[in-house]
Image (cartoon, grey):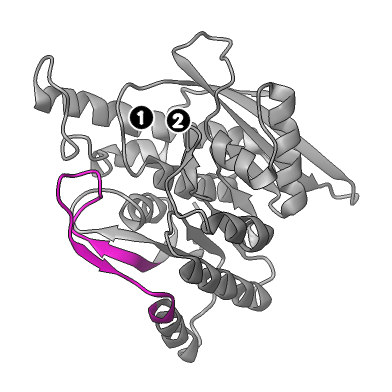
């Protein structure tokens, strides 16, 4: 691999114990050769799926202060910005300001955004974040990774067929991002009800100046467990694999979904082993087996094939 100097500003949660937010994104990106500068939007003892959690939340002003420090030293030069779960509108608006300023300094900067709003028909962030994502965040994003519910919320259109999904992804392209991956959907899988359907769409400009759109569909094996930090790992892997496979959404998605599969399989088998027969694993036992998956992150065996639509 050639020496690259590729720098990511990742603005996400931090936990002392476990893997979510920056803890989920930093190690995999570093393993794949990226320099990761982290701003921790919160610092918690652990993720909020545990019985107890303690910690601090970074305000929009405190985010601005940290960014000002980087800027004063003239080291505010980034190739990527990565963001995920946020609960505060003023914090999100400050992120947008920072992204816009970084894009003025580097017009080639790629902003990878997981627009975390909710899932399965209900929101798990305050409703006032919805218009901020729709009107301010998505328009400055280059790669977005919504689930079906988030894609529907952002476009105001429901998805009940593959054709609907393609139309929703096109609407999202028209809002700004050239790469859209719908990480999960309620569409029926051709492989039966033990599989989820994910879809992706990438707009590219060919050498002759004409625009093209590549669309793909993937059948993802379902896993019967609740994991935390998987969305954060997914967005980080999309960042990495689209970097290594630009204009080849099929390859970048196959690698990303394959990494997810390997990490989740390793985690679920460990959790069941620790919990013992017939017992549901605890949140602590279900923490992603990230370090143990280093080899899979670096060079994933492809276990998910994408179909070009």
Question: Relative to residue 136, is residue 102 depicted above or below?
Answer: below
- Secondary structure of the residue carrying numbered label 1: helix
Q: Nearer the viewer, residue 66 or 130?
A: 130
The residue sitting at 29% across, 38% down in the picture is 293
Say which mark, if any, is on residue 74.
none
Question: Relative to residue 304, is residue 17 depicted above or below?
Answer: below
- How many C-alpha atoms fall within 10 Å of the one at disc 2: few (<14), some, or many (≥20)? many
- Secondary structure of the residue carrying numbered label 2: helix
Q: Which residue is mark 2?
A: 258
Residue 178 shown left or right of residue 270 in the figure? right
x and y, in percent, of residue 84 in the image = 45, 54
- Residue 276: image quadrant is top left
- How many C-alpha atoms fall within 10 Å of the one at disc 1: few (<14), some, or many (≥20)? many
x and y, in percent, of residue 211 in the image = 85, 45
Q: Which residue is mark 1?
A: 262
- Residue 23: image quadrant is bottom left
Residues at badges 2 and 1 in contact (C-beta under 8 Å)?
Answer: yes
Q: Residue at the bottom extreme?
A: 72
x and y, in percent, of residue 306 in the image = 60, 25
Question: Relative to residue 124, is residue 67 depicted above or below?
Answer: below
Numbered range of the magenta stretch: 38-62
- Residue 59: image quadrant is bottom left
Can residue 309 be seen in this snapshot? no
| Magenta-span inclusion, residue 61 | yes
Residue 53 shown left or right of residue 79 in the figure? left
The residue sitting at 41% across, 35% down in the picture is 259
Residue 271 shown left or right of residue 304 in the figure? left
| Magenta-span inclusion, residue 219 | no
The residue sitting at 36% across, 54% down in the picture is 21
């Amino acid at each position: 691999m050639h020496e690259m100097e590729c720098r990511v500003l990742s603005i996400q949660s931090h936990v002392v114990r476990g893997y979510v937010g920056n803890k989920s994104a930093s190690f995999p990106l570093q393993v794949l050769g990226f320099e990761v500068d982290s701003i921790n939007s919160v610092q918690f003892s652990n993720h909020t799926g545990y019985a107890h959690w303690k910690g601090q939340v970074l305000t929009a002003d405190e985010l601005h202060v940290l960014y000002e420090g980087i800027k004063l030293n003239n080291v505010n030069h980034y190739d990527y910005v990565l963001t995920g779960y946020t609960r505060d509108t003023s914090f999100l608006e400050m992120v947008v300001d920072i992204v816009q300023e970084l894009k003025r300094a580097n017009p080639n900067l790629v902003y990878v955004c997981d627009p975390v709003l909710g899932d399965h028909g209900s929101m798990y962030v305050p409703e006032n974040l919805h218009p901020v994502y729709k009107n301010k965040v998505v328009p400055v994003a280059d790669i977005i990774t919504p689930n079906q519910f988030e894609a529907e919320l952002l476009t105001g259109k429901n998805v009940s067929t593959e054709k609907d999904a393609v139309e929703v992804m096109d609407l999202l392209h028209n809002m700004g991002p050239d790469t859209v991956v719908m990480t999960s959907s309620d569409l029926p899988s051709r492989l039966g009800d033990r599989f989820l359907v994910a879809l992706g769409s990438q707009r590219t400009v060919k050498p002759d100046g004409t625009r093209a759109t590549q669309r793909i569909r993937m059948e993802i094996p379902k896993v019967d467990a609740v994991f935390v930090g998987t969305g954060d790992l997914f967005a980080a892997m999309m960042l990495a694999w689209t970097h290594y496979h630009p204009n080849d959404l099929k390859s970048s998605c196959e690698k990303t979904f394959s990494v997810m599969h390997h990490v989740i399989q390793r985690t679920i088998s460990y959790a069941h082993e620790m919990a013992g027969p017939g017992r549901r694993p605890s949140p602590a036992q279900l923490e992603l087996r990230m370090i143990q998956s280093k080899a899979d992150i670096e060079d994933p065996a492809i276990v998910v094939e994408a179909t070009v639509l």
